[in-house]
Amino acid sequence: MKSNALFGRAARVLMALVVVAMLFLFFSNDFGLVDIHKASIVVAVGVDVTDKGYEVTAQAAVPAPAQGAGKASYTQVTGSGATVADAVDDINAKTGFYPKLAFCNLLVLGESCAQRQLFVVLDYFYRNGYVPLTALVGMCRGSARELLGKKPADGGMSASAIQRAMSEELKYSANSSTVNLKLLAQDGGSKSASCYMPYIEFSEGASSSGGKEGNSGAGTGGKSGQEGEGGAAQFTCLKTAAFSNGVFAGLLNEDAAFALNLIRCGVRYAIVNTVYGGKNYTVGLKNTGGGARMGVKGGVPVLKLVFKASATLQDSESDPAAAGRADSHVVKDELIRSVTQTVKERMLALEDFCRQRDCDLYGAARMLYEYEYGCFTALKGEVLPSLKVEYDIGIKSVG
Amino acid sequence: MNDSLCTRQVCFIMYAYPVAGKILMMPALLSFYCKNDLVFPAVLCFLAQFAVVWAVAYACTRTQKTFFELIGGGGKVLKKAAMWLFALFFAAAALVPLLEQKLFVQEIFYDTIPSLIIFLPFFILSVYVGSKGLRNAGRTADIAAPLFVAALAALLIMSVGESNLSWLLPVLKTPVGELLNGARSALYNFTDGAVMLMLMGRFRARRGDCKKIVISYAASALTVCAFLALFYSIFSVISPDQYFAVSKMAIFFSALSLVGRIDLIAAYAMEACMLFALLLYVQLCVTCVCEALGKEQTAGRNVSPASAAASVAVNVLLAALVVAFNEMYLPVQQFYRMYMWAAFALFSFILPAAGAAAALLRGMKGKEAGREK
């Protein structure tokens, strides 16, 4: 019993010594973890393909100590290398900053990436366990470096403005085919082997700082690169880049992209402009329900594209609400038919694109594999050539 | 009869710890072998394991003896050999979860890859807890299990919105051979029969307790299967590469972009439970070693020197293996998948079933002897 008590006392002393040693290690150098002064939090990455490999542009927020107020709070650096990872390492070598990708929420692929296999270009981001699968992905006109170097109207980071142009809100209003790394890989790796991403375009308007667009008060939003740009850039993602088997298949125009968004993006509210009797009418579509149903009729796969919505008249060139009407929001039957026709034309534009480019953006092959496995195996995966597409568009006016 | 535990604690252990040990890497592993049919090999393993757990739990209501006391009739050599073999088995069973925990901690607690020293203080806790015996395992389960359930529920609620169950279709189109291969490869995650066998005779099983334990284990199996289905319906084709699903499944929850990674609070809570699930192997290993040496684990409230020495020895061995295989998780896992499945089949399925049968036979003999008298 005496030896046990002695043993217990010795164990307690030993435990205390171990705890003190661990605390010493912890407070002396934080176990050698990354120094905050040498870390840069990458919020967006742009990738361009060059003759020598890849050029990676990182837009990074650089943590600055409190006494460093007034210094740049974000920076943009470009590195090059044989692979994307090599180019990221080049950024590290050039700047001395350790690029942390855990907060990277945007990946922009330059137009040049269309030359390469999509998932080869993105390979680094799937392999790197620290890049979140929620990061938004888009392709841009021109180079990604140039796009990220543009200064948005609010004077802040271009990454934030681009993310707003690809936001969930725009996705749910059919104005952007927003996808993230996860959805892209899922679509690309599915039986359909086709995927899409928003196509980012920019236009330059008024000057950003102190201009008529105003400044949102991002006072610390100075930028080390790309100074001296003229007007403020406005970013839009109305078009969509499509890929089939990882190869760039082409660009969906605004109409086809709108139709794709109705089917794939769970749109909640959409605006459609239609011309009826030579006049423009803008109709809001709410309570929407869009989707695709796969079936087989006589051995032929049939894809039924469904879109249901309630319509309200938002704007009219011929019938101003100020004239004093009690039913100004009601959409007349003939106008409903015109809107339905407009939506159908957009869906037909999407179908044309899919058939001409052999790009299954509907996910028809995947649905056939899931719901009609026998038919899928009979067709040996060649679904699109034999696919029959039916439309069920039901738009009604709100009461 | 050694009343180390109460039935509630056994139920907690048989619910929370089997789940905690299977949701870290098994989802990615099974999705690699069986793709969208990943639930079925798990169901196969659980059915077999359920039968074993039920048999042992039933045997617990018929005898108050531990497994080692039961086989004592077969001779001292057999008893000692069984004790040492089970000690080795639990040490071996702890190795892969240890390496998984190390990688998991490094991934979720740190933004960069930290050095091994970050994880080694775990062994200080392990030495301490390992030496304390099974009474301590029951007490930790009392705290860890409710925490685990709350954290898992929070994570599942945050994850379910991103799921698309159509990814699980078409059902059972994976060749049977691949399903069986998946089940065999996942077998190293199934130690529940062996754990139940070790708990036999360490709690006073009353009428109805068998039902409680079996229901707890069935709930555990259902939870794991639901988790697997949810996992695949979120990640689908990229599932095989999604290690540590627990920390990744909830990141698509839209509120996280506003409030930050609050899902990590639940992940940390689950991590704590996973650590205690892992420590149970160490505790069982130390218990087996002490019984093989014929020493008590505790003297009054104090840990006996034999138990402390055994715990240090077991942990030094495990720490050495962790250091040796620091960068070799996949080769070790492959070794377990390819070769160690037989050991897990023997110790988690065959021996517990045999132990339960022996206990029941002895019980029947005892009854007959009583009638004859």
Image: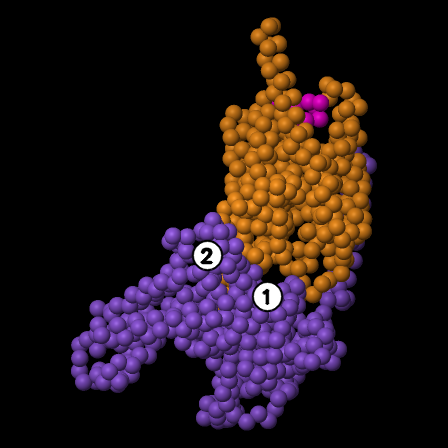
Chain colours: A purple, B orange
Q: Are marks 2 and 1 in contact (CB under 8 Å)?
A: no
Q: Chain of mark 1?
A: A
Compared with B320, A280 (above or below) is: below
Q: Residue at x 72, y 47 (%)?
A: B334
Which residue is denoted by mark 2 in the rendering? A367
Which residue is denoted by mark 1 in the rendering? A132
Q: Quadrant of the C terminus of chain A?
A: bottom left
Q: Is residue A146 visible to us here?
A: yes
Q: Residue at x 38, y 52 (%)?
A: A298
Q: Quadrant of the N terminus of chain A?
A: top right
Say few, some or many: other residues with alpha carbon within 10 Å of mark 1 (under 14 / 14 to 19 / 20 or more): many
Q: Nearer the viewer, residue A180 or B313?
A: A180
Residue B35 vs residue B99: left or right?
Answer: left
Q: Which mark is residue B99?
A: none
Compared with A264, B12 (above or below) is: above
Q: Which residues are magenta?
A: B63-71
Position in image of residue A293 (x %, y %): 39, 58
Q: Is residue B157 visible to us here?
A: no
Residue type at mark 2 is: Met
User: As drawn, which residue projects farthest toward the top?
Assistant: B373
Marks 2/1: CA distance?
Answer: 27 Å
Q: Residue at x 78, y 28 (%)?
A: B81
**Is residue B65 inside the magenta stretch?**
yes
